[in-house]
Image (tube, rainbow, N blue to C red):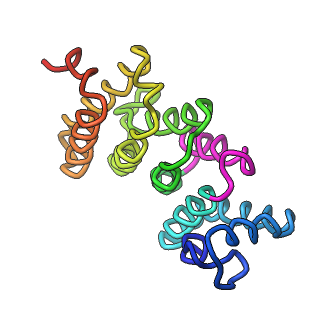
Amino acid sequence: MKNVLGCKEFSFNGTLTTSAQNNASLAATPPATISLVKSALLSALADESDAARSTSSQCIAELARLLIPDSWPELLPALLSNVTSPTLPDAVKVSTLSCLGYTAEALQDKELPQELTNLILTAIVDGLAATKDGSPVADPIRLSAATALRNSLLFCAGNMSRKAERDVIFQRVCEATQSATSGGLRRAAYECVVEVAERYYHHLKDYMQ
């Protein structure tokens, strides 16, 4: 499904088409069918199988590329709910954050409403926190969040322009660069720093110490 959805010359129904026809084909698909696909993909993020969670996160991103911002308003609130839930397993949060990263990458060429950008960043920054409710956040969750943040920085100029939001983002990233338990997390956090330097260098002076 991921390959079909992501192919610029393959329609939702499996017929070779142009990109424009591909979008039209999806638009012509019965809403009930699309709703079933959406629900199944979101449910698969909590599957016991690592492979199922990984594949669903990529499929969701490809479908989001076609449907957001107008035709899947429930997606980002659902992903945010997964990340911030105090009861869902860590594996679900990791797959959800991976999904957010893939989705951010898939949406890079779109002009997103600020409220959608806010939802994406809120979920990612929550996942990147070192602690939550007094307990440490697992390294795989933070690593997935750091990777997702790197993919999201392209379209968060509005958030980076606001000091309060920028401070939180920088605080989380700087904390991650100091991780004593995960070299992968440190590397992903420094990749975020590089991305910030390339896109928002004029904001770095307040945080260079």
Indicate whether residue 83 is drawn in magenta: yes
**Image coordinates for residue 55, horizontal then vertical, percent:** 52, 70
Indicate whether residue 179 is drawn in magenta: no
Q: In the rendered view, tell whether residue 174 sits above or below residue 143.
A: above
Q: Residue at x 58, y 39 (%)?
A: 112
Q: In the rendered view, tell whether residue 70 sits above or below residue 198.
A: below
Which corner quadrant holds the N terminus? Answer: bottom right
**Image coordinates for residue 200, horizontal then vertical, percent:** 30, 29
- Single out the residue that lies furthest toward the bottom: 15
**Image coordinates for residue 133, horizontal then vertical, percent:** 47, 27
Q: Quick one: 30 or 136, which is closer to the camera? A: 30
- Give the side of residue 103 with respect to residue 185, left or right: right
Q: Residue at x 62, y 30 (%)?
A: 115
Q: In the rendered view, tell whether residue 126 sits above or below residue 83.
A: above
* Number of disc labels: 0
- Give the side of residue 159 with respect to residue 32, left or right: left
Q: Residue at x 49, y 73 (%)?
A: 51
- Give the side of residue 141 with respect to residue 171, left or right: right
Q: In the rendered view, tell whether residue 201 sits above or below residue 61.
A: above
Q: Quick one: 100 or 202, which is closer to the camera? A: 202
Q: Quadrant of residue 66?
A: bottom right
**Image coordinates for residue 15, horizontal then vertical, percent:** 69, 85
- Single out the residue that lies furthest toward the left: 209
Q: Residue at x 12, y 18 (%)?
A: 209
* Segment tinted magenta in the rendering: 66-88
Q: Quadrant of residue 163?
A: top left
